[in-house]
Amino acid sequence: MPSPRDIDSIPAYLRTWASELEERILQSYPPLHGFAAPASPLVGQLLRKPFPAQTLALMGVVKRWNEARGAAVIAECGTGKTLISLGAVHVHSDRKPFTALAMVPPQIVEKWAREAFLTLPRLRVFFIDGLRTPTISMGHVGINEVRLRHGRIVREGLRTTLTELRLRRTARTARERWDSICGAPALFIVGRDRGKLSYFWRHAYGIGQCGRYRGCVVNPDTGSPIYLGDSGERLLAVDFKRAKLSEILGTGNGEENPKRRRTLYSPLWQADAGKIRRFAPVDFIGRYMPEFFDYAIADEVHELKGDTAQGNALGTLAGSARRIAVLTGTLLGGYADEVFNILFRLEAGKMVKEGFEYGEAGVRAFTETYGLLEKVTVIEPEDNSCSEARVTKRVRRRPGASPLLFGRFLMSLGAFISLEDISEVLPPYREEVISVEMDPVLKVAYKKLEDDVKAALKEHRGNQSVASVALNALLLYPDRPFGLGNLYGWEFHPETQRREKFLISETGDLNEQIAYSKERRLVDEVKAELGCGRRCQIYAVYTQKRDVTRRLERILSNEGIRVAVLTTEVPPESREGWYERQLRAGVQAVICHPKLVQTGLDLIEFPTILFYETGYSIYVLRQASRRSWRIGQRLPVNVKFLHYAETMQESCLRLMGKKLLVSLAMEGKFSSEGLQAINEEDDILMAMARELVTEKGIGEKADEVWASLQRRQEEVFCVRSSETEGLAEEPAQEAQFVAAEAVITASSELPAFTPQEGIRRKTLRHEGTSENQLRLF
């Protein structure tokens, strides 16, 4: 054993005490279901046999349900979250008929039904298409039973409504009546957009017609003026805007001699009878059917973290079922407060016991305890030396999460599973960054635009309109060097006291009829992949006013490639069927925005993914890049990122590669680069603006950063030597990669990481941690 002097870094410490740390962790956090624990014999009754890692997660959820109402399946894309949740329901029900309610993204409603039929025996599946009143003339309404016919979901069988389902008739309860009608396990599936779709509302207040309050805004319940807030400010008609307002009666606000009375809630809004009469199905279930469902499942729960109608539907779902399971691939996106609302909706009692209250104050306290806050102080000297300097202080959140968050909440709540746990059944996954030189005429035009933007950023330092408009133009212009027009920014003028427009740059229009170098390279890549019998999925992020997808469609079609474009005109619930129709029509390549397919859809028929444009959302990039690497994929998956060399596209891709190292660290796969990137500017758009002005990072290639990312993934996941050797025998066009290739497999060693260095001098507040403590975990 080395002496303490030889342990000079965290990796050395981990390597030295690895076995002791492992034993201590298992003693402190024993799993509900370990590797040696036998699985329930009911697992063998599933129509699809789960993998060993899926069985562990499934049994963990079952045992969690035996102790508490809520559980979470935190698993990466493609690990089988649907199978795990449905299998847990089957095992926990213990051969008894059950009713389960699943709220899922609208684009995967039919996929959920299909997987349910292929997983659970004797199951009946129903779609909740609305309450009972149709919103469109040809739309489905009520509750409709669906069945699997020749691999497709069709609506046939029992038809009813929620209003009928809640009635008990001659039975003792509505649930007993349903059991006598159905007589088998039942799964109800509702799309997230339909589940939260409620009625329209309008403000409800009165205007005094006589007396001392004549002409004043009054509460219809009391006939008195409305006072809100601690200061008791009196509301006027202009205060009633888009938000719902309410008043608590009995507090004595604005009264000269307040009387003691029981406090009452008085809403200052009501349903608008002049518009569509409808009611949110999930709200109806929560109000009138609280004990009807045994289980509730919420898929892609990370999209329900906000204080929105869909997020509130999650809380209603959790309160209306006896057991609930939430599924997500990225529960924690980098900030501790992102799980605050989810935890409150699943375990409100525990959150209150920990001392947190629901609302902004609770979020702030939660971030101070389990997250990371940065206090920025700006000192601006006054014009004359006699006056004091003006000091501005602001507090903002930073990426990071305390280990206490996982120990106190997530470890007991969730069953974790990653791709390396099931990587033995997945094909190789490779990423490649392709750098393309610009045509001379395009390079000259881009250089002029870049100089103008750089000058505008220096002249109008800190102006958000310049950063947003100009940097997006730098990302778009190489791909569409025409029709951009003049770029303008806005700035507040102190003399006129108005926001005034100023010119950033006059963009030149190049020839629209020719194909530029990046477009020609895209055609070559698509032809090479099609020559190997591989369909291509192409992503582009500019699809609206400055549409790039239609130009790519025309260029590929002129080369004899059968191509289709997926747009927002295709409803989310119809996108899976849209892909099936295009495949039957013989499509070879599909172009779309990555957000349209980032969750739920399986693009197994498209083993090659080409990012013609990436944007600067890391979450969208990670989700969209894994659409083909799923269970059931048999071909190697190639993901390629195209960009113009020495442009903002390269800077954006390089910065995203660094931030992806942070994402690995958030999943427990540490790296020194990722930990250092946590303390950099977390807004990629602002980081690109800073690089453009300071020219920091010039000469650092995007492919070098992504090669480093691939090497880090190899260290984390380990590379199977036999498969890596087999890759060398593939065709030459598939072996010409700029970046390093990685095949993700199971990890057997602890990932190495080093302490942070070079942190900028800012005040970072994180309660319960020391100055040099690792702030991520």
Image (cartoon, grey):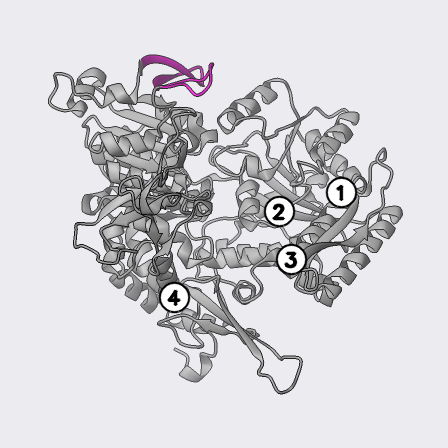
Q: Nearer the viewer, mark 3 or mark 2?
A: 3
Q: Which residue is mark 2?
A: 431
Determine which quarter of the picture holds residue 110. Answer: top left
Considering only vertical position in the picture, is 388 above or below 672? Answer: below
Q: How many angstroms separate mark 3 from mark 2 (CA)?
A: 33 Å
**Is disc 3 placed on a helix, strand or loop?**
helix
- Magenta-colored span: 133-158
User: Given contact means CB atoms under 8 Å apart, are the residues at marks 3 and 2 in contact?
Assistant: no
Report if residue 570 is visible in the image.
Answer: yes
The disc placed on residue 561 is none
User: Given contact means CB atoms under 8 Å apart, are the residues at marks 1 and 2 in contact?
Assistant: no
Which x, y percent locates residue 489?
Answer: 72, 53
Q: Which residue is mark 1?
A: 479
Along the polypeptide, which appears first: circle 1 or circle 3?
3
Q: Nearer the viewer, mark 4 or mark 1?
A: 4
- In the displayed structure image, the side of residue 184 where residue 342 appears, left or right: right
Along the polypeptide, which appears first: circle 4 or circle 3?
4
Q: How many angstroms separate mark 4 from mark 1 (CA)?
A: 44 Å
Decide which of 744, 172 is in the foreground and name it. 172
Considering only vertical position in the picture, is 153 above or below 744? Answer: above
Q: How many angstroms separate mark 1 from mark 2 (CA)?
A: 22 Å
Amino acid type at circle 2 is Glu
Image quadrant containing the N terminus? bottom left
User: Given contact means CB atoms under 8 Å apart, are the residues at marks 4 and 1 in contact?
Assistant: no
Report if residue 30 is visible in the image.
Answer: no
Considering only vertical position in the picture, is 314 above or below 558? Answer: below
The disc placed on residue 464 is 3
**Furthest-front residue in this view:** 211
Q: Residues within 10 Å of mark 3 (few under 14, many from 20)?
A: some
Look at 56% across and 50% down and name the residue there.
618
Q: Which residue is mark 4?
A: 368
